[in-house]
Amino acid sequence: MKNKKQFVKILGVGSYVPEKVVTNDDLSKIVDTSDEWIRTRTGIRERRIAAADQTTSDLCVCAARKAMENANVGVDDIDLILTGTITSDVILPSTSVFVQTKLGLKNIPCFDYNVACSGLQYGIEIARSLIESQRYRNILLICGDKLSVITDWQDRSTCVLFGDGAGAIVLSATENEEENSIIDVLLGANGEHSELVILPAGGSREPASEKTISERKHFMKMAGRDLFREAVKIMGNCAQEILGRNNMSVDDIDFLITHQANLRIIDAVRERLDVPLEKVCVTIDKYGNTSASSCIIALDNLIRNGKVVRESKVLTVGFGAGLTWGAAILKF
């Protein structure tokens, strides 16, 4: 017979970005761009790029170790690994199995999921459901990507945007509702816009060939203007809906963390929601767009700087390829 209802608490958060810093001036040496052009259009000043021998799983492991240390848990405490990534080490098997091996977590279930920049919100919902099923107690949720390997460094409209990084959260079961960290999660997707952000080749639709390589179809393609419009609309709607259904307003939220895709998008969402500047976390200037890990990296920055403390409420909103989106209200 199952015990009384289980809730979910966040035990620890951690993040990792590679050591190598690539500034806008560095990029101006390889494509026709400038620091001023990039900053005024994106808000990005620099980004981190992984070493050639670093894999996505390496980034994830570094973030996971920090989260586990902050959560004060060991390898024997984790009973499931969940990894959100769009840059798997290899197509087969999952990145999670490499993470498992490198962390020394033997025989526990692990799997990947792919929703791009909405990875945190989707991952929280998956982890919450698994913990509430009472089959798992401690889940290691990781979001990480080495976007530099799927970035077209000849395309100035996209190569200036991305950086590499990973974030991790340890979520644990609790029977004490007062310790519950997840107030609500809202998810959505619309495949009709799947072509707005896409890596065209390498899958079953268009397997790798000399033609796909010569046409540079193994790099991300983006319809920037259309994506900007959809991101502002959908993230704004998503945030308003999740606040409304919980009888909350922005006054009840201590911090807003949106996916760090573009400072103009962040500002537009903030203005739409009428959130004060001091409540909005921005890290895109230092790290660029790191896909699903961007929200966790931002959250970890707030925690390490002492801004998120006990009883703080954080609204996170993500938006990514698919198109996918999600929002989560978290309590610490």
Image: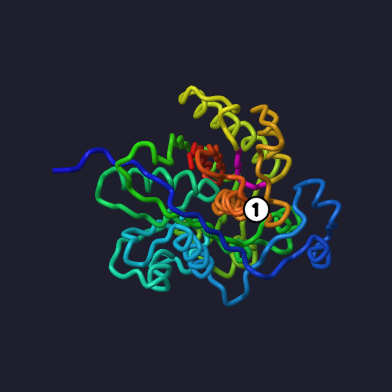
Instruction: Examine the rendered structure and indicate whether residue 154 appears above or below residue 174.
Output: below
Identify the image quadrant of residue 34.
bottom right
Which residue position holds label 1? Answer: 289
**Which residue is painted at 64% across and 47% down in the image?**
260
How far from the left and from the top, in percent, is residue 65? 47, 66
Q: Nearer the viewer, residue 12 or 290?
A: 12
How far from the left and from the top, in percent, is residue 143? 50, 56
The colour mode here is rainbow
How far from the left and from the top, in percent, is residue 71? 44, 57
Instruction: Examine the rendered structure and indicate whether residue 257 appears above or below residue 57.
Output: above
Q: Nearer the viewer, residue 18 or 146?
A: 18
**Which residue is painted at 73% across and 40% down in the image?**
264
Identify the image quadrant of residue 138.
bottom left
Which portion, as a residue range, is magenta? 255-261
Judged left or right of residue 153, residue 181 is left
Judged left or right of residue 30, residue 146 is left
Q: Secondary structure at mark 1?
A: loop
Q: Nearer the viewer, residue 163 or 332?
A: 332
Q: How many marks?
A: 1
Q: Is residue 167 magenta?
A: no
Disc 1 marks a residue whose amino acid type is Asn
Judged left or right of residue 147, residue 30 is right
Q: Residues within 10 Å of mark 1 (few under 14, many from 20)?
A: many
**Which residue is painted at 47% across and 36% down in the image?**
188
How far from the left and from the top, in percent, is residue 1? 13, 43
Residue reaching furthest to the bottom: 53
Q: Nearer the viewer, residue 180 or 19?
A: 180
Judged left or right of residue 207, residue 269 is right
